[in-house]
Image: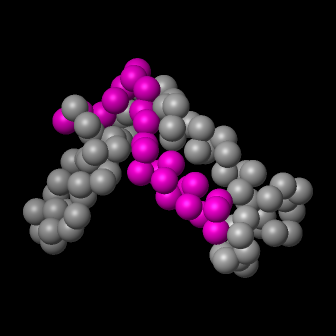
Amino acid sequence: MHERFDKFSMSDVLVPTVNYACDGHPVAPVIDSYVETNLRRFESAIAEAPFDFANARAAWFAEGRPPAGEFNRNPDLVTTLETIGRYLRSGALKLH
């Protein structure tokens, strides 16, 4: 879709997402509700088949609860997106 319809480079398209992940964004009550519901699902899934949930827990449940009305920041996502952008600019990574 990006390759066919977008006028901007993917690294430029990623800039607003990097800014939100770095600076944070307010978590709307409806998103808080979805996140809390999914936490219960993940907790059940972990009990049945253990998997690493540490990154998601740190990103969305740092205080042990969803961050309703607070600013959510995700420094790990910033690192990932900046790395993708760097590889795209260098030509080492191509999206097809």
In the image, is residue 3 above or below residue 75? Answer: below
Spot occupied by residue 19 in the image (x, y as percentages of width and height): 59, 38
In the image, is residue 54 above or below residue 73? Answer: below
- Left or right, residue 10 beside residue 56: right
Q: How many marks?
A: 0
Q: Residue at x 17, y 54 (%)?
A: 43
Q: Quadrant of the N terminus?
A: bottom right
> Which image quadrant is residue 35 in?
top left
> Which image quadrant is residue 90 in?
bottom right
- Left or right, residue 23 beside residue 3: left
Spot occupied by residue 47 in the image (x, y as percentages of width and height): 10, 63
| Nearer-the-camera pick, 38 or 22 | 22
Spot occupied by residue 42 in the image (x, y as percentages of width and height): 24, 56
Whether 85 is among the magenta residues is yes
Spot occupied by residue 50 in the image (x, y as percentages of width and height): 15, 68
- Left or right, residue 20 beside residue 40: right
Q: Residue at x 64, y 68 (%)?
A: 87
Residue 57 can be seen in this image: yes
Q: What colour scheme was applied to this rendering of the protein? A: one colour
Q: Quadrant of the C terminus?
A: bottom right
- Which residue is at the far top? 69
Whether 78 is among the magenta residues is yes
- Left or right, residue 6 beside residue 73: right
Q: Residue at x 28, y 45 (%)?
A: 58
In the image, is residue 14 above or below residue 52? Answer: above
| Nearer-the-camera pick, 3 or 87 | 87
Q: Residue at x 48, y 26 (%)?
A: 26
Residue 36 can be seen in this image: no
Residues in magenta, as a range: 64-87
- Which residue is at the far left? 47
